[in-house]
Image: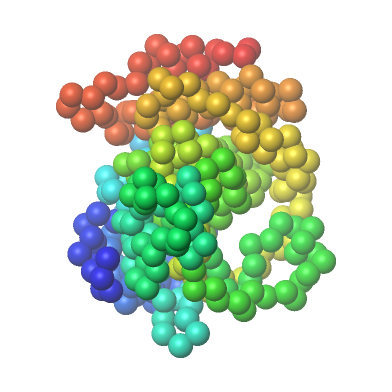
Amino acid sequence: MAGGSGALLKDEVDIVIPTIRSLDFLEMWRPFFQPYHLIIIQDGDPSKIIKVPEGFDYEFYNRNDIDRILGPKASCISFLEAACRCFAFLISKKKYIFTIDDDCFVAKDPSGKEINVIEQHLKNLLTPSTPHFFNTLYDPYREGADFVRGYPFSLREGSPTAVSHGLWLNIPDYDAPTQLVKPRERNTRYVDAVVTIPKKALYPMCSMNLAFDRELIGPAMYFGIFGHGQPIGRYDDMFAGWCSKVICDHLGFGVKTGLPYLWHSKASNPFINLKKEYNGIFWQEEAIPFFQSVILPKDCTTAQLCYLELAKQVKDKLSKIDPYFSKLADAMVTWIEAWEEFNPAPAGEEDVDFAKLSIAKAAGK
């Protein structure tokens, strides 16, 4: 995609921002974000006034709106956690989603040029991925790169790219224990590279700089029930990353990571983070091997069907760790119910059988 042509897709992109504060940070992003439509999700107290700078095209939702729009299904949307952003994924009608945190700013490349994150994400999403065979020159579809000697010609067509995972300069995305032992560490290393994450390899997905093809993988981009009222927090994007990667592998889609960078300006409190992450630090040691071993049936041919099967397996295999996982599995099914309601199948395509949803919810009990 030629430089600047990202604006040609402006009607196919939604920018999703979860926030608890006034969005003054948008002023820095104005040259890059103003052509696009924004969906802003207010977390926390819905009576708090959130200021959005003038001149942006946006929708705004708070918890009262989520409860009103989803009714009983609103229980699947986290509260007091940035996972609330997935409500925007649910109601968007655009092909591509870019989501960013409100403490992230425009970064510069080594030449001093400001980085257009949306343009780079679209480049990633609009070019194929190479999950089945690693190219040692990284992304072979970038200008100035190609497939190296020995790369099978039968695989050079690549796979559709479903997820583009961007990175960050300045404050690293660390867990609480690492924050505590490395409080002054900063990421100053800019690596001019994009790579496809190999098939069967999981990765720690961070949602502060993330884009995805909603039509390919949207139903799997559910950030679970985390934070307020739950025994775990700060694992919402990790969970969505594990689920979506397993489903991308099954459906033949690719996931890219690397460029673009943004500037992460503020480290969260490591002591508060430790309270939120405490159970997750232990649970991930069993949850990750589970996701590594998941096998989805051949008849799971859509992201929705894959996700329902994954919910069943989460309940069957992870509930022994803690009853929370049974509740999480039920929320995964509720999420798909909501997805089907707001995103009915196009004419000629079959909707998910809602009778199977109840079966999936009951499974493992």
The x, y position of residue 199, in whole percent, is: 52, 43
Look at the picture and state if 292 lies above or below 72.
below
Is residue 41 at all visible to an observer of this figure?
no
Residue drawn at (63%, 36%) of the image: 292
Quarter assignment of residue 229: top right
Is residue 348 at all visible to an observer of this figure?
yes
Quarter assignment of residue 265: bottom right
Q: Total of numbered circles in the picture? A: 0
Determine the residue located farthest toward the front in the rendered image.
150
Front-lying residue, 70 or 178: 178
Query: In the figure, is residue 290 to the left or right of 192?
Result: right
Colour setting: rainbow
Residue drawn at (50%, 16%) of the image: 360
Residue drawn at (36%, 45%) of the image: 154
The x, y position of residue 123, in whole percent, is: 34, 63
The x, y position of residue 147, in whole percent, is: 41, 60
Determine the residue located farthest toward the bottom in the rendered image.
111
Quadrant holding the N terminus = bottom left
The x, y position of residue 73, in whole percent, is: 44, 29
Residue drawn at (29%, 70%) of the image: 34
Query: In the figure, is residue 199 to the left or right of 160?
Result: right
Look at the picture and state if 43 lies above or below 242.
below
Quadrant holding the C terminus = top right
Front-lying residue, 347 or 59: 347
